[in-house]
Structures are given as structure tokens and as C-alpha cells.
Amino acid sequence: MAMPAVAKADTTDLALVCDRCIGHAVMALGVAFTRQTGVRIDVFPTPSGLILPQLAREVQNDVVISLASRVAEGQARGLVLPAPMAGPWRNPLVLAIRRGRGTATARRVAASDVTPGGAVDGVGLLARLNLHPEAVIGTHDGGEAAGLLAAGRADMALLHLSEVRADPHLAVARVVGTDIAPAPVFSACLSALTRRPHPEAFLAFLASSPAGRMLAAHGLETVA
């Protein structure tokens, strides 16, 4: 795959924090960027609600990829820089099953509870979807729900599309319509704590067409 030309000189390894639900996709992009530039991207997937508190406590990161609403809050608080930026990207919510299994036996559904570290009221969303399984298994976030589904401890799980694409054993049973819940939107920016030279090179890479195709393969759609 052809990659865009980005700055190589005077750039050291970069630390990146991102929402846990997009960790697999961001790691894949980091590998592609390293192959192109030789610059390693150390990716730290983190519960969504904990990213800004970490930055406020001066946990050093160069690049931040999170919900657009959290990025905007970070800008208002001076925790992330207003420019440059990359994105935004939509990451639809879906009901997932284990590949090869139907939905008729979805008696146990895993969905995230409202927690300080989470971003989706999964249990409330199931009610809006008019789903009434025998058991709703509340989880900390989508990653835990995906693990329960993959292990056979749940028959269905409410996940981001990126979480389904990260596990070849999972498949989409239903996409949550925007009339029920808008697809979460993510953006990339620089941390106000960045000290390494030229971290904007990775943002330029994220904005490129090849990176856009990679993101789409991982379930993230570029917002026009």
C-alpha cells in the first residue's frame, strides 16, 4: 500500500492515548506509520472517561484520539492543542454475535453500564431498542462485553463496529440506527504535554487517503 510522504527527520517515538474501543485500529495505523517513517507509535488504549483526567495529571502523551466531545472539552481546558487535528470519524454502535450464530437464541446480552470510565449507556440503549432478553449483563465497557461474547458467556453484545472488526470471531447482527443513538464520533489532536519533535506528522498521516482506507476497514468512517 502506498503511503504519503511524511517528515522523517528529527522525530522520535511518539506516545498516543486513545479510547479503548478503537485501540486495535489505532495500533494497526501505528504499525503502518512506523513502516513508512521508522517512528514508533506507542499506543495506550484507555477507558474513554479517564483520558482527560490523565492529561490533567500530566501523564505524558503526544497524540490523543478520543470522542470529539472529549477533545473539545480538552481544548477548552487547555489539555490538548486546538490545531492541528485529524478526523473526525464515525464509529457506529452495533449489536454483535459470535460468527455463525443466529440471533434467535440471544437470551443473554452484554452491554456497558454507565461508569466514570465509559462513554455509552449500553443498558439504557437496549431498552430504547426494545430488546428484552432474559438477562442483561452489565459491563465496564465494550471491551469487556466483547470478551464475554467471544467466550460464549453472552449471546449478543452491544459494541462499537471497531470492536467487532477487531475480533474475527464476531459478526454484526444489527447496526443501531441514528434515530436510536448517533454514531460516536472521534477526533485526533496533539496533547498540550507533547515535547517530542514533529508529532503532527502522525496527524498528517491519519488525514491521508491510505489511512482513511485502513480506518474504514476497522469500522471507522471519515466524516465529510
Image (cartoon, helix red, strand yellow):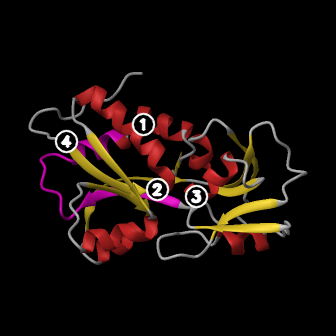
- The residue indicated by pointer 3 is 144
Q: How far separated are the C-alphas under marks 2 and 4?
A: 21 Å
Q: Nearer the viewer, mark 3 or mark 1?
A: 3
Mark 3 vs 4, N-terminal side: 4
* Residue 127, quarter of picture: bottom right
Distance from disc 3 to disc 1, alpha carbons, whole Å, reads 21 Å
Give the side of residue 138 with respect to residue 5, left or right. right
Residue ID at (60%, 41%): 165
Q: CA distance from mark 3 to mark 4?
A: 30 Å
Q: Position of residue 39 (x, y in %)?
A: 22, 35
Q: Earlier in the sequence, mark 2 or mark 1?
A: 2
Q: Is residue 176 above or below residue 115?
A: above
For label 3, count other residues whose C-alpha is less than 10 Å away and answer few (under 14), some (14-19) or many (20+). Answer: some
Describe the element under mark 3 as helix, strand or loop: helix
Residue numbers of the magenta segment: 185-205
Amino acid marked by disc 1: Ala
Distance, label 2 to label 1, CA atoms, is 14 Å
Decide if residue 180 is in sight here: no
Give the residue type at disc 2: Arg
> Quadrant of residue 148 in the image?
bottom right
Residue occupied by mark 4: 13
Q: Secondary structure at mark 4?
A: loop
Give the side of residue 169 with respect to residue 78, left or right.
right
| Residue visible at 14% across and 39% down in the picture | 11
Q: Which residue is mark 1?
A: 28
Q: Give the residue pinned by disc 2.
A: 20
| Circle nearer the N terminus (1, 4) | 4
Note whether 195 is above or below 139 in the view shown.
above
Q: Is residue 135 magenta?
A: no
Q: Earlier in the sequence, mark 2 or mark 4?
A: 4
The residue located at (17%, 57%) in the rendering is 194
